[in-house]
Image (spheres, coloured by chain):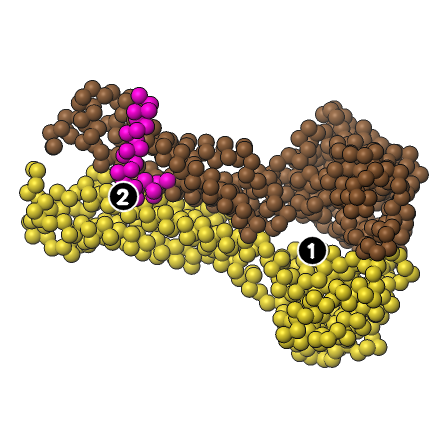
Chain colours: A yellow, B brown
Amino acid sequence: MQIKPILSALRRHKAGTILIALQIALTLAIVCNALFIVHERVDKVNRTTGLDETNLIAIGNDYVGAPETFAPLMKTDLQTLRSLPGVVDAYVTNAYPLRQGGWSTGVQTDPDSKKEGISTALYFGDDHALKTLGVRLIAGRNFNAGETQTVKREQQPGSPQIIVTKALADKVFPDGNALGKVVYLAKGKPSTIIGIVEKLTSPWIENNYVDGDYVVIMPVIFDSSFQNFLVRTQPGQEDAVFKAIPQALYAVNRMRVLPEKLGVRRFEDVRARAYEADRGMAILMSVVCGVLLAITAAGIVGLSSFWVGQRRKQIGVRRALGARRSDILSYFMTENFLIALVGVVVGVVLAVGLSQWMFTHFEMKRLSLTYVGIGVVALLALGQAAVFAPALRASRVSPVEATRSV
Amino acid sequence: MFSYYLQLGLRSLRRNPVLTALMVMAIGFGVAASMTTYSVFRATSQDPIPQKSSQLYNTQLDNRGPDKLEKGEPPPALSYKDATALLRAHKAKRQAVTYPIGVSVIPDNPSRLPVREGAYATGADFFPMFDVPFIQGTGWTLEDDEKHASVVVIAKSLNDKLFDGGQSVGKQMNIDGHLYRITGVIQDWAPQPLFFDVPNTGGFDDGAQVYVPFTRAVDLKLPNAGNNSCTEEPGEGWDNYLRSECIWLSLWSELPTKAEAETYRQYIEGYAADQQRAGRFSWAPNIKVRDVPTWLDVQHVVPKESQVSLIVSLGFLVICLVNTVGLLLAKFMRRAPEIGVRRALGASRKDIYAQFLIEAGTIGVAGGVLGLILTGVGILGVGLVFPEPVARLAKLDPVLILITLVVAIVASLIAAFYPTWRAAQVQPAWQLKSN
């Protein structure tokens, strides 16, 4: 390939060359960081909770007034919910996955330990919890009806029986055999692990409070005014149950509030709300990438067309001297490739620099090299695609041009 | 001359509609992306109480020990012990403790359903200290605080709901089964960022409709609806909770001068030192007394998403500009012969500058108008990208419109500078010769 003449021609078009290279470099820097953010967020949004999320409804409920205890009210509500047509099962809890608010506590194996223990999410429930959530019990047994205790607001919950996630079981007892072992979630209150579930995530999507899928379920009715009910419906009955719930609950007890925003929600709404910011960021960055690549391509087309227009005479001369059409085509393609190459080399440096800067300032993850690679290939291909039309036009310049107006 | 150059510019732009459209779109998209993300950034980084932000101070002190802190930053809230001790000492012109509570208001009319409202337990100083605008009555008094009085301040929306917007001062209302006397009605007041309750709201929230005295709320054991953090089990019951080192209260103080702020800071430092001497803390005083802007900064109120997207879209604008420089260069240099003729006929370099900058300016204006339209679309779409409490703060107001247009025109002039300079360097002789 005749690279030398291309280089000497470029030396006479410094400004244009630098502009295209610069544009490619900046585009690469932004695009691979943006794509990386998209990838990260999409990964996060696609994480599973361990629940069967279809046909599941979450209810935030607030009892009004200050009775001696809320337990009978909850019992009535549970009976009401469980007897609604189309409902498979229901239970009452303090928190559930993706709720973005809940309890965390420390797990100890030593009752006298002064350390904080392994931080875990704490869910309350009863013998209906596992069936309602649709999580899979992989070892041990479920709670039975007699094990559920009512715990007062000011008491420390610490039931004799608990069910934990496999992740937590493996963390606390790395040798396996967590089943039947005793742990401490409150001082002086031993809890025996009677069951292990395959997967269940904490209420938070960030690992601020709990460092993994560490969850403990306790057979506890927590006696306070704010409660969450989870309801599993039969397939196809979700809409009907969703509509029937407020009426049915207000019919048994009017002294309650089902908040407008976080009252009765389908689980898909719970999920959508939890990942709102991540989804938004992924959309924004995808749009930015798309528009950016389009603008860069348009810029290359514009500048290349200008060059072709400017060099019609020279092209004519070359053609007249025996260059074939394919020679002209490959001349412009190679020229663009060389410029783009310089652009991506600078771009890789900028991309890594930008990623490093965002890493220190925004605690974002460092750019993975795969994305740099993808960006480099994408931009080289984009350059070739963009220059193809002007180059084709150049190759069609007739040798006659050489004879005109010289 | 200006209108003549403008005509020339427009004619030239019409001659190459695709190139022109490309440049206008590049500037339009670049400006719109930057302005849309800027509108969110501006809203989240604004000063919520500009007239007083440098006189209002949040107090933090380390009651858990340096090994339990992240980067030595004392916890964002205070324990009941410390908050009430500092309140009693009263070393500031005004001061108030706050914590969020959740309340249900029970309407007198039994056919109406109870309503859940966001609420704060706080002190009498809260209202004058934060310039809370009253539409009826006033806040309660310091005496009410001392008497643990059952009084309440409500906001306009709740007053509309309960009393159809009528006069309600002096009336009773039922909150969770307890009667309170209304002393005043305020506007639906929620400065954004909600500086006085960042730890619980992240800074963006509807604010509260109900305010009750802190002393009364503690008597009624109204549970904290916000974050609570304990490093040790507080023990069972409300009284143990109050005695514990759990942190859940914000203390704000009004200190009109720098000197008063310094004295206050020294007092807090002294208080922490006293606690160390008394054996409660086994570490040196670690306290922070921060005014509103510093507090918002340290609490990272501006969402990470907002900053990252602003940076990315500014990068986007720069790329659009580089693109425009390239296209303008192509466009201007193609007209080298025309420039040669004009120069030969006596036009000075200055004339060439004026002509081409005006042409670029028209592209800037067109790009600005397109950018403005796209910014409008973008702000409508902000809800897709940012959570609702943040998204609704982004508004297309006159200031933003002006900024958008100015940015577009300035950007296109910057982009035009190099191509214009090249155009002005055209040697008339060469151009004339080759034609």
Q: Which mark is residue A261?
A: 1
Residue displayed at 23% across by 39% down: A13
| The magenta segment | B1-24
Amino acid type at image mark 2? Leu
Residue displayed at 78% across by 41% down: B165
Q: Main secondary structure of the magenta part?
A: helix
Amino acid type at image mark 1? Lys
Residues behind callouts 1 and 2 on a single chain: yes
Q: Judging from the image, what secondary structure is the residue with disc 2 in?
A: helix
Q: Earlier in the sequence, mark 1 or mark 2?
A: 1
- B288 sits to left or right of A406: right
Q: Which residue is mark 2?
A: A303
Above/below status of B432 relative to B35: above
Residue displayed at 69% across by 72% down: A232
Above/below status of B339 relative to B377: above
| Chain label for disc 1 | A
Q: Where does the image place residue B48, in percent across and percent down from the top left? A: 66, 36
Q: Where does the image place residue A186, in percent across and percent down from the top left? A: 81, 63
Look at the image and tell me whether residue B99 can be seen: no
